[in-house]
Image (cartoon, rainbow, N blue to C red):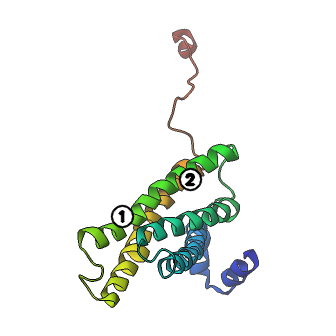
């Protein structure tokens, strides 16, 4: 994957290359997101159109869980490789906590579409139901969860070691005689 990324960067004009390098973390996160989007869709539709046909929200939750595991591995090893400093157990626990919130955010639009707006058969046609499911679960839900996760991963899961924490700071204590000297 690194070789492909380097080949793409080499072909970009200089202003775009500089912009891509400046925002490389976001671009890597987007590539991981695209990959996990495909995983999510494959699992979601694989389950929704077969064994979990009457339970689309359950299918969506399982799909997001599978995609989240793939996402952790790819984000840890590629997108945020240069960040961190936490123990892996702590980092993984935070990752899955943030992803759990993302799971709720990504499933909520589908739940609202199906059970609040009643966009399911027999109230609407099968085509309308499928379009509503795709838009609510795969577009709206994924977008909302993605924005939240990128912010939360950078802030809490993979913090930049160079950024000073906003917690307690040690301040050297100097008495007034030191200042007078």
Q: Residue at x 59, y 47 (%)?
A: 93
Front-lying residue, 153 or 165 = 153
Front-lying residue, 168 or 12 = 168
Residue 166 in picture, x, y percent from top left: 50, 37
Front-lying residue, 111 or 168 = 111
Q: Residue at x 34, y 67 (%)?
A: 111
Label 2 sits on a secondary structure element that is: helix
> Does the residue at mark 1 contact the one at mark 2 (Cβ under 8 Å)?
no
Is residue 161 visible to us here?
no
The circle on residue 96 is 2
Is residue 171 visible to us here?
yes
Res. 69 image quadrant = bottom right
**Sequence-wise, which precedes: disc 1 or disc 2?**
2
Residue 105 in picture, x, y percent from top left: 40, 61
From what the image shows, is residue 124 above or below residue 87? below
> How many labels were placed on the picture?
2
Q: Residues within 10 Å of mark 2 (few under 14, many from 20)?
A: some
Q: Residues within 10 Å of mark 1 (few under 14, many from 20)?
A: some
Residue 149 in picture, x, y percent from top left: 49, 59
Q: Relative to residue 87, is residue 133 drawn left or right?
A: left
The circle on residue 108 is 1
Res. 80 image quadrant = bottom right
Q: CA distance from mark 1 to mark 2?
A: 18 Å
Q: Relative to residue 91, is residue 98 drawn left or right?
A: left
């Amino acid at each position: 994957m690194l070789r492909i990324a380097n080949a793409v960067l080499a072909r970009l004009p200089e202003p775009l290359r500089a912009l891509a390098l400046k925002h490389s973390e976001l671009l890597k996160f987007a590539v991981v997101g695209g990959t996990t989007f495909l995983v999510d869709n494959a699992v979601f539709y694989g389950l929704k159109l077969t064994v979990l046909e009457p339970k689309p929200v359950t299918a969506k939750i399982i799909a997001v869980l599978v995609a989240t595991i793939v996402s952790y591995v790819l984000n840890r090893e590629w997108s945020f490789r240069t960040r961190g400093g936490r123990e892996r157990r702590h980092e993984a626990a935070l990752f899955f906590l943030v992803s759990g919130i993302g799971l709720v955010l990504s499933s909520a639009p589908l739940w609202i579409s199906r059970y609040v707006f009643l966009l399911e058969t027999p109230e609407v046609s099968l085509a309308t139901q499928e379009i509503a499911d795709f838009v609510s679960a795969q577009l709206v839900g994924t977008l909302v969860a993605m924005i939240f996760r990128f912010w939360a991963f950078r802030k809490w899961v993979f913090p930049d070691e160079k950024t000073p924490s906003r917690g307690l700071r040690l301040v050297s204590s100097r008495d007034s005689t030191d200042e007078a000297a």
